Each structure stands twice: as C-alpha cells, then as structure tokens.
C-alpha cells in the first residue's frame, strides 16, 4: 500500500478519536441542526440577551427548530455556533420528495461551511433548500450511508438496515421494504408506526400507519371498480373496519367463479381434474368428482347444486 494512503488512514484513525475523519463526516454526523444541551448553553452564554430569549433559544437549539421572536439574539447565536464548529458541521437537507402508493423518491443534499447555523421551520421535521441557502451554506448532493430505523407500536426504535446513497438520490419501494423486513423476522411494515431515514431522521420519516390507511382506501376503491382482489385486501388489512364486508364479497366472488367453472366442466370446456386442482374447497367438488368417470356424451343439462343454473351441452 502506498505511503500516502497509509498516512491518510493513520490520520483518519487519529481524527476519529478526536472528532471524526473529514471525508467520512457524513457517516458519523447526525446531519441534524439540533445540538446538545451543553453546546446550546455555551452558545447562548456567549451572547447578551434577556432571560426569556435565553430560555427560548436554548429549547430551539436543542430541537433544531426556529420559533417566533428574539430575531436579533437568534441570529447572533446562529452565527456564533456556526463559527465555532467551522467546517466540521454538516447538515442534511431535502431538495425534493415524491410519495405515491408504490414508494417514495428523495433527493437529499449535504450543507457545509455555513455562515449561520441553519434551523428548521416550526412544524417541519427536515431542512429544505431555502433554509440552508438562508444560512449561507455551501451545498452538494449527499453521498454516504443512510441508516433506516423503525419505530414500533410500543415506542421502541429499532435500527433496520443501511443504504448507500450516491449523488443524493434515494428510492424506496414499500413492497421491497415490507419483504425485506419480513425476511429479517421483523414482521414487515405492519409491525411499525414510523420509518425514519437517517440518524435522528434528518431525511424525514414515513408514517406507516397513514400509509396503510391510504393503501386500504385505494384498495377498496379498486375493488368497487372491479379491479381489486377482495381476498388480498382481507390478507393485507385484517383489522380494517371494512374487512368483514370485503371478506363476504371475496367469498361471494369465489363462489361465482366456482359456479362458472362448474358450468364449464358440464359443457366439456374444462376437465373435471382441472376443476378439482383449481378449487381445493368448493361445494361443487363432489358432483365434479363424479364426472371424472362419467361416460362421454352423458352430460346433458346438468343442474348446478349451488345456484340452480342449468348448464351443459344440448344434443
């Protein structure tokens, strides 16, 4: 290995002890604007301000969210905090986000060399481009590792897996995520209330509860239009308030399909063996089984046992 590479690795190992290697900062920094209690206290103590603003800004820095009022004091604290942390500070921000029934698409960036410490707007859980631009930060597409975590129904946060992000593009398929969680023995998306993207959710969250409600509503709509599969809805949403009605609809649809297949057997368009293999449970299995050894040409006007529909071939 070249001497230069060895020297760089040794320097990185030393910097890791002191606070992090520069080219790996995206992996070790949470990329959120929130700071610890000590850092917030030091920042506020360095600025002369009233007691009320001091308490307010302390809470704002710990949350990473800007409030109302105390504008001059906040600006001074943001400038001082950014100056003390220098180039070490990194912030994740969202350039764009698209969400649909199948998945989500994120364009994420990294802000650095900020003149002011950026803060989120109240009511938002991520930094947006205009906020890091307002803090006079330099920006680039995020490249690094993003940790995905899941919040369970009982409030526990579980690290799920890591994704390598290149050129700031992050795509997530709900179906693939659900399958991966099931293969890992974590119960799938249904076992979580929220999925968080990045350490401390700097890239946002996915509300899994609302997602399931949204998907269920669209599934019901498709079923009402004759496009959805009732049995699949019952399997995916067993606790839904409409599950009982959809289950009855699924049973009715299954009986209709069995009736049509029974008529096809009676006409000779479908073999009795194919029917029995297709429908493992059916009120038509017994009469269809009797057709297995019925002499050819004796299938005249057979009456279905389920709905009383005459079927068969007329000579």
Image (tube, rainbow, N blue to C red):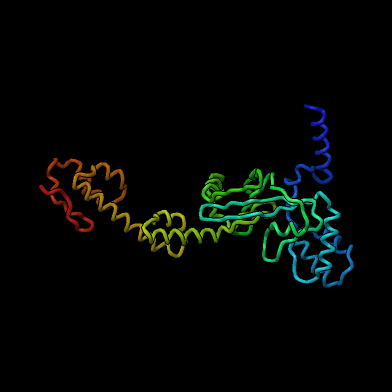
Q: Is residue 243 left or right of residue 113?
A: left
Seen from the viewer's position, the closer of residues 266 and 174 is: 174
Residue 152 shows up from this direction = no
Q: Position of residue 174 (x, y in %)?
A: 54, 51
Where residue 207 sits, quadrant-wise, is: bottom right
Name the residue located 75 percent from the left edge and 61 percent from the top edge. 119
Q: Residue furthest left?
A: 315
Name the residue located 71 percent from the left edge and 52 percent from the top edge. 92
Counting labels gives 0
- Taking 61 as reference, is 177 above or below it? above
Q: Position of residue 12 (x, y in %)?
A: 81, 39
Q: Position of residue 309 (x, y in %)?
A: 19, 57
Where residue 34 sits, quadrant-wise, is: bottom right
Q: Position of residue 39 (x, y in %)?
A: 83, 58
**Image quadrant occupied by the N terminus:** top right
Seen from the viewer's position, the closer of residues 132 and 285 is: 132
Q: Residue furthest top?
A: 1
Seen from the viewer's position, the closer of residues 289 and 207 is: 207
- Taking 124 as reference, is 14 above or below it? above
Residue 258 shows up from this direction = yes
Q: Is residue 68 left or right of residue 299?
A: right
Q: Is residue 110 left or right of residue 282?
A: right
């Amino acid at each position: 290995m070249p001497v230069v590479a060895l020297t760089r690795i040794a320097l990185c190992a030393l910097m890791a002890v002191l606070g992090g290697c520069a080219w790996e900062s995206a992996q070790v920094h949470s990329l959120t604007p929130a700071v610890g209690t000590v850092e917030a206290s030091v920042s506020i103590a360095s600025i002369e301000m009233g007691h009320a603003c001091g308490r307010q800004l302390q809470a704002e820095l710990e949350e990473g969210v800007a409030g109302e009022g105390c504008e001059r004091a906040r600006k001074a604290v943001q400038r001082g905090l950014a100056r003390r942390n220098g180039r070490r500070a990194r912030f994740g921000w969202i350039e764009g986000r698209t969400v649909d029934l199948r998945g989500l698409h994120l364009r994420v960036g990294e802000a650095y060399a900020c003149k002011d410490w950026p803060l989120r707007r109240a009511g938002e859980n991520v930094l947006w481009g205009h906020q890091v631009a307002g803090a006079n930060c330099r920006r680039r597409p995020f490249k690094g590792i993003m940790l995905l975590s899941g919040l369970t129904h009982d409030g526990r946060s579980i690290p799920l897996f890591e994704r390598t992000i290149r050129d700031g593009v992050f795509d997530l398929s709900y179906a693939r995520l659900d399958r991966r969680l099931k293969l890992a023995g974590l119960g799938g998306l249904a076992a979580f209330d929220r999925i968080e993207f990045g350490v401390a959710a700097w890239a946002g969250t996915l509300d899994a509860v609302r997602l399931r409600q949204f998907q269920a509503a669209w599934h019901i709509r498709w079923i009402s239009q004759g496009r959805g599969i009732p049995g699949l809805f019952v399997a995916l949403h067993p606790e839904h308030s409409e599950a009982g009605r959809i289950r009855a609809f699924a049973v009715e649809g299954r009986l209709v399909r069995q009736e049509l297949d029974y008529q096809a057997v009676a006409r000779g368009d479908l073999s009795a063996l194919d029917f029995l293999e297709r429908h493992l449970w059916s009120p038509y299995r017994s009469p269809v089984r009797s057709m297995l050894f019925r002499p050819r040409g004796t299938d005249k006007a057979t009456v279905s046992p389920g709905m009383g529909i005459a079927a068969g071939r007329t000579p």
